[in-house]
Image (cartoon, rainbow, N blue to C red):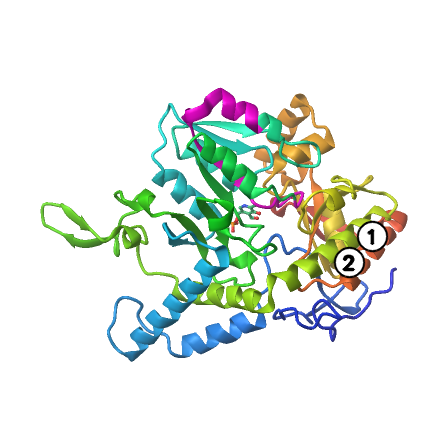
Amino acid sequence: MTDLIDHSTSTPGSGTAALPRVLGAGSRATILDGRTVAVAQLNNAATTPPFERTVREVTEFLAEYGALHRGAGPRARATVEAVERAIDRIRTFVGQPAGNGLLFTSNTSAAINVLARLLPLGPDDVVLTSEIEHTSNNLPWRHNTQATVLDVRADDAGALDLGHLDRLLAEYGGRVKLLTVTGASNLTGFCPDLKGLADRAHAVGALLFVDAAQLAPHRRIDMAAAGVDALAFSAHKVYAPFGLGVLSLPRRVLERAPVDPGGGSIDMVVDSGDVVWAPAAERHQTGTWNATGIVALGASCAEILDTGWDVIEAHERSLVAHTAAALDAVPGIRLTVPAERYRTDDRIGTFPFVVDGLHHALVAAVLEHEHGIEVRAGTICNHRLVRRWIGVSDAEQARISAEIAAGDRLASYGIVRASLACHTTAAEVDRLAAALTAITADGPQGRYRAAPEHETYEPA
Ligand SMILES: Cc1ncc(COP(=O)(O)O)c(C=O)c1O
């Protein structure tokens, strides 16, 4: 079995001590052969550990925690002030335009669903989305609006086909009310040029919405400069896993009755049922706010901004180049996005691959249980490109869908995804490449049983 390097004492981004520290960076796990090894967290696109600073600021905040907007004493005041400071940090973090407001939800998926229900989209309207979207930036537009939803095509490496976008814009013109795209793909890491997309959308009078769930942890966002009208992301992917989602949107969209009314939405309900809505900026923030989540995200934003995007991006870009080369050199695996596309395109560190002859979920289980390396496997909420890579016919898809519906989640085709973050080290990437080399040469060393209900394999 491959030698495992113990990184429990290394600093994040070894050699670049200025990078933020995450909680649990040195955490260890006992693997199948009984050894205890440092965990390599290469599943950051799913969720990130919290920054140490984030946990520290949250702990300090909770010591003074009081009723937000529902109390008058010193603790309530301290809570309001901490939340307001955090909101300022979040606004700065995304470069929010002056005319926008923020809404807080539980995650990106909830934020996009709220936006879909808030926008006045009728049957004559067209929403342009794309083939590279996460399900959460696809289904809400189809299920929660009456608009016609069309997909901009992508090439096999998941880059948007701008020629196709231009043809759709020319064909539907003023009927296009919204262009909604990912800022960075959870499957391929591809980052479209947001300014170029904004210019195209605005030329026909449409809004540009960006699903920034994967963009926010990895690239500086300047909504105002790029012309992004609305944007959503999840705090649990930005080193602040305290159950918060963020939606930034033009205030004029909020000048309507809330789609989820309740406490906090209203200033008065008279007995007849007539309602005096709270001011537009507040009436959509129904119920008690997730103050802890907001403070946590504010702390993570501040940590990133204080570190400097130039430092974080430089570290991650060099890791992306290193990872593309390291994985490309492993015999027996196929990078479904060719390694050179990480050089020629703007991509975050998200690497999908398949291992010849081994089920994707088994590969992920072996990496975890025999090597202490966390990754993700499956269609990862983005099945269309995966289906194309695997070459699944309509007939096969129908059979697979039926088997999944019958309870066998392992019937799905899929890929393995390794994803990097600012705390990832080159040594962790090298461990992944070494582990994959061992797996492709010798196969799994342990015995596993299928756990179809969890779409995984478990040690037998
Ligand atoms: C690009 C993208 N959009 C949306 C989501 C949904 O985020 P959440 O699960 O936090 O709602 C994800 C989650 O992985 C994502 O990667």
Q: Quadrant of residue 319?
A: bottom right
Cα gap from disc 1 to disc 2, whole angstroms: 8 Å
234 or 407: which is nearer to us?
234
Task: Rate crowding at label 2 as few (under 14), some (14 to 19) or many (20 or more) other CA atoms within 10 Å.
Answer: many
What's under tag 1, amino acid-wise?
Answer: Ala
77 sits left or right of 459 in the view = left
Identify whether 47 is placed above or below 139: below
Mark 2 sits near ligand 1, with its Cβ under 8 Å away: no
Task: Quickly name the residue at label 1.
Answer: 326
Q: Earlier in the sequence, mark 1 or mark 2?
A: 1
Question: Measuring 62% from the left and 25% from the top, which residue is drawn there?
Answer: 398
Task: Quickly name the residue at label 2.
Answer: 429
Q: Residue furthest right?
A: 441
Task: Report the magenta residues as a range.
Answer: 165-189
Confirm or deny contact between disc 1 and disc 2 (CB under 8 A).
yes
Residue 218 on image: x %, y %: 61, 55
Identify whether 39 is placed above or below 177: below
